[in-house]
Image: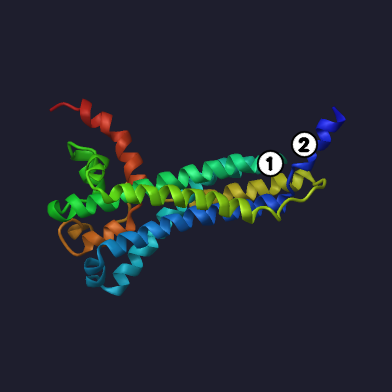
Amino acid sequence: MVKLSQKLRKHRYRLSADLRFLLRSLLTILLIQQLLRVCLMLAYPSDTLYLPLPVIAEALFYGFRFDLMLSTWICIPMIIACAFPSGLRVRSLWRAWLSFMGLASIITGLVAISFYQIVGAEQGSSFYQWLANGEKLPWLALAQRWESVIWLMVAILFSGLLHELIRASDLSCRNIGRENNWKRLGIFSLLIIVAAVAMRGTIYWGPPLKPEAAQFSSYQHANHLAANSSFSVIRTRMRMPDRDNSPQ
């Protein structure tokens, strides 16, 4: 029993190591969301260049807020685990969680980009509204494109790279020793407050830059940049049964 206790203690991390691991995880997921937003801008270079610079900056600011909310939601289980000395002990489990959520974010982002390329420009509708009112799921349209297979392979490779980067960055964080549990609980309370502030705001529709001309104007692309594809896919998928059961 003593040997088992010593073995578990050896695999514990100091609070500072847990906080570094949590911060790296949050920044990695946030970086993925930002890269997806850059990909959307590159997919429509003419529309992006047509927008005034202040509008692009405002769209990217709102987009960053959405990405921060999504990244914080993904890291909520890790924040809760920080309250316990051994909560983040199994690093491989949390790396797998981050890799899965990163891969899911990449796939939903590619679905959104594919939608704008196939349907969005023709119908002048937003991704969320087309999902809520359309008869087909956008990933069916995505599956019809050969390049989507290449994108999926890139997403899987990126997910594996993400797993290795977080693992390699955590090799020097292990430190054995006793700590004050009250200090850990105090830091945990502070993390909860910071997470609550980071997750403030609506996650359904997003902040339109110009509501009266959001659909059929140059500001439509700015609204696309300000939205978050993962939130759009998840929220709309949850609303689909209500739409199907609604009276005709």
Q: Amino acid at mark 2?
A: Leu
Q: Is residue 51 left or right of residue 72?
A: left
Q: Mark on residue 8?
A: 2
Q: Nearer the viewer, residue 147 or 217?
A: 147
Quadrant, the C terminus: top left
Q: Nearer the viewer, residue 95 or 54?
A: 95
| Circle 1 residue | 89
Q: Earlier in the sequence, mark 1 or mark 2?
A: 2
Q: Amino acid at mark 1?
A: Arg
Classify 96 as above or below 30: above
Q: Quadrant of residue 144?
A: top left
What's the distance in space between the residues labelled 1 and 2, CA to CA?
A: 9 Å
Is residue 229 visible in the rendered image? The answer is no
Q: Is residue 176 left or right of residue 224?
A: right
Quadrant, the N terminus: top right
x 30%, y 63%: residue? 41
x 19%, y 65%: residue? 218
x 22%, y 25%: residue? 245
Q: Is residue 160 left or right of residue 8?
A: left
Is the residue under label 2 in contact with that under label 1 (CB below 8 Å)? yes
Color theme of the render: rainbow
Q: Nearer the viewer, residue 4 or 125?
A: 4
Looking at the picture, how far across and down is residue 114, in whole percent?
25, 51
Q: Secondary structure at mark 1?
A: loop
Is residue 87 visible in the rendered image? The answer is yes
Q: Quadrant of residue 63?
A: bottom left
Looking at the picture, how far across and down is residue 140, in whole percent?
24, 39
x 25%, y 63%: residue? 44
